[in-house]
Amino acid sequence: METDATTVIRLRGFEKRYRRQVAVRGVDLEVRSGEIYGLIGPDGAGKSSLMKAVAGVLAHDGGRVEVFGITVDSEAAAERIKGRIGFMPQGLGLNLYPELSVEENIDFFARLREVPAAELARRKAKLLAMTRLAPFRDRPMKHLSGGMKQKLGLVCTLIHEPELVILDEPTTGVDPVSRRDFWAILAEMLRERGITTLVSTAYLDEADRFHRLSLLYEGTVLATGEPDQLRAHAGGDDTDLEQVFVSLLRDQGVAEEVTASVPSTTTPGNEAAIEARELTRDFGHFRAVDRVSFRVRRGEIFGLLGANGAGKTTVIKMLTGILPPTSGSGQVAGADMGHAGHRIKRRIGYMSQAFSLYRDLSVMENLRLFAGIYGVPRRQRKARLRQLIDTTGLAGNERRLAGDLPMGIRQRLALACALVHRPRVLFLDEPTSGVDPLGRRRFWNILLRMAREEGVAILITTHYMSEAEQCDLLALMHAGRIIADASPTELKARLERDAGKLLELDCDRPLVALETLEAAGYRGVSLFGRKLHLLSRRPERAREKIEILLRSKGVRLLALRPRPPTLEDVFIYRILEQEAAS
Amino acid sequence: MTWLQRLFTMTVKELKQLSRDPILLVVIAYFFTADIYIAASGIHMDLRQASLAVLDHDHSESSRELIHRFQPPWFELKGELSDTHQARRMLDAGEVLAVIDIPEHFQRDLERGRQVSVQMQVDASNSVLGTLVTTYATQIASRFSQEKAQELHGRLKLETLPAVLDRHRVWYNPNQNDTWFMSISELLTVITMLSLMLPAAAAVREKERGTIEQLVVSPLTPAQILLPKVLSMGLVVLAGTAVSLFLMIVPAFGVPIKGSIPLFFAVTALYVFATAGLGLFIATLSRTLGQVVMLVILVMMPILLLSGAWTPPEAMPEFLRRAMVLSPLSYFIEMAYGILLKGAGVKLLWDSILGLALLGSLLFGFGVWRFRRQFG
């Protein structure tokens, strides 16, 4: 291990309140020098508050915060540590200036930090090359893709070569390839400068990227340790961390609902509930959606995966009749989207990202409002709402304001509102982003029941790979196109057929190994915490070759074992394939 | 039937949301009560306590008599000055509004029947006040000279002197009480502002919170989404107007309501509808509440300035007078004063009603059209 044991961040009994609401309580945390330390938890777990306090931009209400051995308890103390810290707040490119070009943004942050001109030129050249942003140095930041914005944000955070970087949800809404680049850059910085990193994420499947991590939930730490230690706690090597999280919550007495395997009581039938034929949409010269075709049958759950800006929302908007397509056609719930838009609207349910509810109305008032909008007959209304409250588990919350509800319940309310008129087709646009794993499981149980028992066709977009696994059919979207389209099992099988088996490699100097393997032409080499992933067509012979290769660089191979590929692996492989082809 | 039911559902929703927004409620309550009270009792169109200093080079009986005609409550004497430099300094410092300079031999020359000039220096940086001071002073001086002339020719009777007597009849506001004018004028301004702002705010709030998408994919038509905002906020504005009129303007300032109250509320409703259409147009241009507020201010200024409330149309340049047809307030002002103070009825006001209805339909149609384009 390439770290020494000096402690960079130490929290003891950390507490933060907003008015009377406690955001974080009693958190102990220790981050060592040269470590990538992860904070994982759903929205509202207290990640941001904690990180801001460490960065010295938010005062705390209790406990002790020590950074570089300095107790951060006053403005003056915070000023002393700020020069040695780089902090990237949450939100894609929110810390950057949209009108300034890539280079101007970097120069601005460098001047702010008083980086000497010669030094700036050197660092800028290096960071731009590393992030592959060099060809875009004159492009205004607002015209960059989400992944590029995030990389630029990272460059601006690193330009003064801080000893500690604090990154708040840097990968939210970024495509898997940019996400992988992002982790690679961090690893590189760690190798070269020994930079310590504190980073947060809402995705549990990113846990393997960290050396150590803390699972946060509602302001407390559920568990701390290395990813494998946490897995062992839940009993198994193959358990994903989501399972760990759920079992930890169960230990805490948070009730869990077993994942119901719902038998299908309707026959899928062959008629398409949603059919898209060559859908295309241009915005000016920009083609947001490019000849997208797919079919979703009754009772099927269809997942649309892709980064922000890949075109998923535009597809949904065309199918729901909000946006006319530039060309192509489609049918939704038995009506043609070209000239029966109004009929479609009455037959579909739609739930857009997270908050599209009236937060100043109560649960019951929201439901009644949508029953009124969709014209549910007065006589049936009461019974229908009662039934919905039961299926979505909202009982007991009827009189609470939607804005006061925890995220998970609010999401189920939004679902109930979308279901009020018994739609035959349901469109869900990132319905679960920011919800904790338990909440997401409950949500999916309802979806499964809707599909299997009532034969509702569901089109859903998500960033969670664990949710994508549950879909009957998946389409991967990238730059407006569908680049792969099959069931999850089939997608993974095709990856193994096309690119070989996924191997997980454990060695004593992973950063050196990463460079060596990439130079030797191995595909899909990627760093996961201290481990490496790579793809190999002949896994049985790979061990020997890799061992020799690594030994020549003084790296000792500890273990090499096959791993089932994840959908993210599939996704990354297909995007790179696509980019290589074009 | 479902069409109306949906409209009703959405209108109730808007009212519920408003009732849960304490800050907005306080703002509405303030504008319809306290704001109107302050405007009516704090702003005057006649002269009050204008500060005045005197340079009396004559110190005679006549000069003192003239000076003492500048009486409270119109004028307030700040005392006598010794030289012109001091007078100038006090004017520059804004300590006095006017200085009267009475020359030497004032009395002697008057008694000899000569013309005498009295100089008055006026600070006209506030042109309205400056004009008022000049007008009042001219009146005082001319009455003084008339009386002096009479004294001099004591034997003559007043009637034998050639003079035009100005006997005016003041209609509609016999005491020329400007709280009447100001309170109604302020009420009209408040109605304008709130009927621009409230529906626009309700619409842009849906955008800000992302609820608009949920509505757009539902079977609601754009009109069904927008009309309820106008209906609900229009009801609020009408209720506020009623409160303001019956609990503030009539009892506190004694404004008589000469015309038909139902007619007044009918034309107010028409006006609110027209202005709200403009507000919805603003909402389609804005992404945030902050932008709505800035645009409302931008739009409101010309509406007020071109309404004829502050400058009579006859006094405006030709092209501005033509532009008045675009200010919904220009129609409403004529109708509101007409109904409230003059007791005018539909017979007199039909052209304004028609004009406002046309302009209102145009503005509202434009707002819906923009919305439809924005959200398919």
Image (tube, coloured by chain):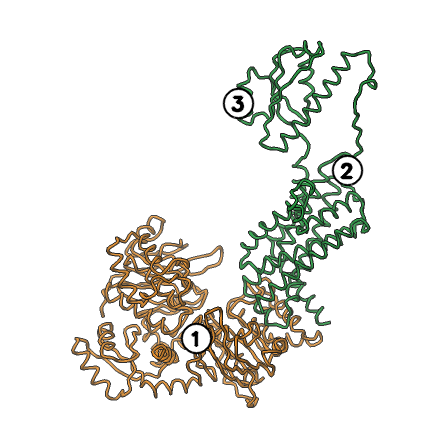
Report whether mark 3 lies on the same chain as mark 1. no
Kindly indicate which chain is depicted in orange in the rendered structure.
A
3 and 1 marks in contact (CB < 8 Å): no
Q: Chain of mark 3?
A: B
Report whether mark 1 lies on the same chain as mark 2. no
Q: CA distance from mark 1 to mark 2?
A: 72 Å
Residue B68 seen anywhere in this rendered image of the structure: yes
Label 3 sits on residue: B89
Residue A239 seen anywhere in this rendered image of the structure: no
Q: Residues within 10 Å of mark 3 (few under 14, many from 20)?
A: few
The amino acid at mark 3 is Arg
Label 1 sits on residue: A306
Label 2 sits on residue: B173
Front residue of B193/B325: it is: B325
Report whether mark 3 lies on the same chain as mark 2. yes
1 and 2 marks in contact (CB < 8 Å): no
Say which quadrant the C terminus of chain B sits in: bottom right
Front residue of A447/B368: it is: B368
**SS assignment at label 3:** helix
Colour that chain B carries in the picture: green
Q: Residues within 10 Å of mark 2 (few under 14, many from 20)?
A: some
Mark nearest the camera among 3 and 1 is: 3
The amino acid at mark 2 is Asn
* Direction from residue A59 to residue B49 in the image, left or right: right
Number of numbered discs visible in the structure rendering: 3
Front residue of B95/A474: it is: B95
**SS assignment at label 2:** loop
Q: Position of residue B192 (x, y in %)?
A: 66, 50
Q: Residue at x 31, y 68 (%)?
A: A132
- Asked if residue B298 is positioned above or below residue A472 in the image, the reply reads above
Mark nearest the camera among 1 and 2 is: 2
